[in-house]
Amino acid sequence: MGFESFLGNPQAVSTVRDMLNRDAVPGSLLFAGPDGVGKKTLACMLAKALNCERMRGNFCGQCARCLKADEMLSLTREDLARRREIKDASRRVEGLIYFDLQLIEPITRFILIEQVRQLRNTAYARAFEFPWRIFILDQAQAIHWQAVDLLLKVMEEPPEGAIFILVCPNPYELRPTLRSRCQRVQFRPVEDSAIRRLLHEERGIPPGQIELATRWAAGSIGSARSLNLADIQTKRRPWTGYFEIIAKKDWRSAGGADWKTFFETTKALSENRDQLQENLRIGYTLLSDMLQVIESEDEARIVNVDLLASLRRWAGSLGLEGLDRLRRGLDDAYRLQTRNVNQQLGWEALALEVTASEQKSTRRGEPSGTGSANARR
């Protein structure tokens, strides 16, 4: 228990503990860095440490205040989940009551002005059960523009005994006046060694899949804990079939088997519209890996490391021009996802366009894999 249980980002932890040990925790903090690296977790730990009855500069997790902090956080999460289910917008913010430790997150797309107004009212009142009142605003970049000025007024003259912790991925998404009032604690992707340890000890990932899982986690503790490698590999399969087909030379003039496989893969890529964003993410990752194969000898940045031989073969055949056309095709699919378009026809047209481009390059005497891994080798 305590800060020792926090994984990764030792510099951020050290900064927070130093503030506590010097009794110099500022009234406004900004925890910034990639998603899933523990920003909100460390903010909650800091809140416990400020109020813990037994320890200075840390928290025990067992005293009455630590247990009460856990209860408050649990109740706020339940309340937020309940309010998000309310369809009537006017009722979503009815009866807001904030504890001494309050987690504030977007109820809709935004953190609403009523939420910030309740924060202001609570901040200027005396704490009921803790020495400190702590307000953790997660996804602070989603604070509604009408609420930012209200929050600024509170942070300009912070009430005694109140601390505001803003949590967001990119601090430059915040208004400069808001950002300037906070002391920033910067977070970075978690080291691969810590991710591997978590995957092995907590998740029980087999040794043969640890490296692939580590690269898909991409430095995120949250991703490592929720990663479903079998699901990723299942969703990746249509993409590997798609690239395998279009990387073949003259596949369109081949027998019916190639065409049958082609239609099966394009159908699989478009079957579930609800999973389009996840499918596109996997497609982008494979394209990025192929580009990495072409541009660099460094294999450490390749995510789909188990497909390295295939990635080299596809990249060598498609070349930079083919990969760029595929990237533009994925961009179009992402942009048109809210429209009623036939996705399967889109993937088929994209494949034919890439193949036609390869054949034109070949007729001009240009190797389709110009600049490719094959050309380097």
Image: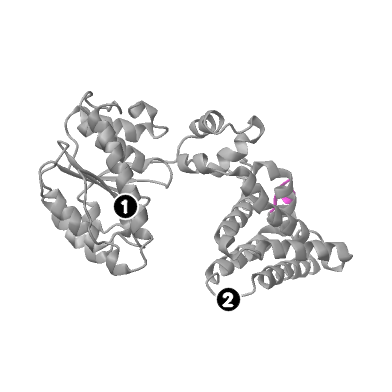
Question: What's drawn in magenta, residue-wise?
Answer: 372-377
In the image shown, does 330 or 315 lie closer to the viewer?
A: 330
Residue 223 image point, x, y percent: 50, 43
Residue lying at the far top in this picture: please name it. 54
Mark 2 — residue?
340
Quarter of the figure with the N terminus: top left
Q: Residues within 10 Å of mark 1 (few under 14, many from 20)?
A: some
Is label 2 in a helix, a strand or a loop? loop
In the image shown, does 41 or 302 lie closer to the viewer?
A: 41
Q: Amino acid at mark 1?
A: Asp
- Residue depicted at x 64% and y 32%: 206
Residue 136 image point, x, y percent: 27, 46
Residue lying at the far right in this picture: please name it. 255
When asked about the image quadrant of residue 199, the answer is top right
Q: Residues within 10 Å of mark 2 (few under 14, many from 20)?
A: few
In magenta segment, residue 375: yes
Residue 304 image point, x, y percent: 64, 45
